[in-house]
Image (spheres, rainbow, N blue to C red):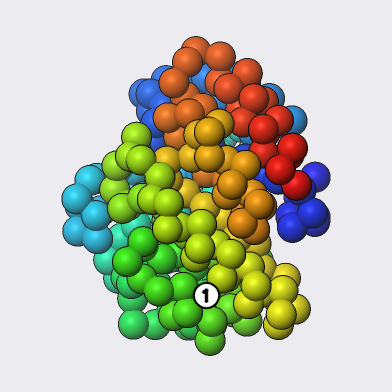
Amino acid sequence: MLKNLTDTILLSPSIIAADLSTLGSVVTTFDHSFIHFLHIDVMDGCFVPNITIGPGYIKNLKQHTDIPLDIHLMIEKPELSLQSYIDCKPYCLTIHFESTRQPVRLLQSIKNSGVKAGVSINPATPVEQLFDILAYTDMVLLMSVEPGFYGQTFIPSSLKKIEKLNRFIQTNNFNTIIEVDGGITKDNIADVVKAGATMIVAGSSVFKSADVNEQARKLLETAKKAQ
């Protein structure tokens, strides 16, 4: 399922929108057909105003599921704690371009550990900032809201950034996944996919009801019609 990530639409529900106190038992009910990854936002209260979880919680959660982990580090100076997140053995580990002066070295460290390396940018950061480092990445995570809180509204100008990044990737024959995070709903997911994204993070739109699998199925159904 995870070999050709650019050939299909993949959903990575963000657990920040779930009840973290019960997720260990709830995650066992998730249907892998619709929930391909678990998106895990790590926030430190510095890079973003909120504080969430750390490697201890992630390692405990991993014991309850074999759904691959998609860890997103929203933290200052990720080089200081990068190894602790590599040790969680996620499928992919994403750092923020704005959070470090050493993005290439960190991306190389992630890749050398056998983990897929991702880099993310905030809405105000031009996507062109990433063009020179795409060779070191497996995935680009474009934030379509300001990072730090779930439930925000999708920023429409994000579509142009997705399109621009997708054109650059295709023109230069990079095998880079475009992931988008923030304000994704059934009303805009088709536009996000048409713009070039193949990996979708969804928080509120998946966890807003008790039937997480059904919410995920509906989102994927809408997204795949746009391919």
Q: Which residue is at 79% across, 54% downward? A: 7
Residue sitting at x 62%, y 42% = 190
The three-letter amino acid code for the residue at tag 1 is: Leu
In the image: residue 32, left or right of residue 159: right
Q: Residues within 10 Å of mark 1 (few under 14, many from 20)?
A: many
Using the rendered view, name the quadrant where residue 51 is placed: top left
Quarter placement of the N terminus: top right
Vertical position of residue 151 compared to residue 215: above or below: below
Outermost bottom residue = 132
Q: Residue at x 58, y 78 (%)?
A: 134
Does 107 appear above or below 35?
below
**How many numbered discs?**
1
Left or right of 214 on screen, residue 17? left
Q: Nearer the viewer, residue 201 or 138?
A: 201
For residue 37, say whether it is visible. Answer: no
Under tag 1, what secondary structure? helix
- Looking at the picture, how far across and down is residue 71, in whole percent? 49, 52
User: Which residue is denoted by mark 1 in the rendering?
Assistant: 107
Q: Position of residue 2 (x, y in %)?
A: 76, 50
Question: Is residue 172 visible in this depiction of the protein?
Answer: yes
Image height of 8 relative to 222, above or below:
below
Q: Is residue 220 above or below residue 117?
A: above
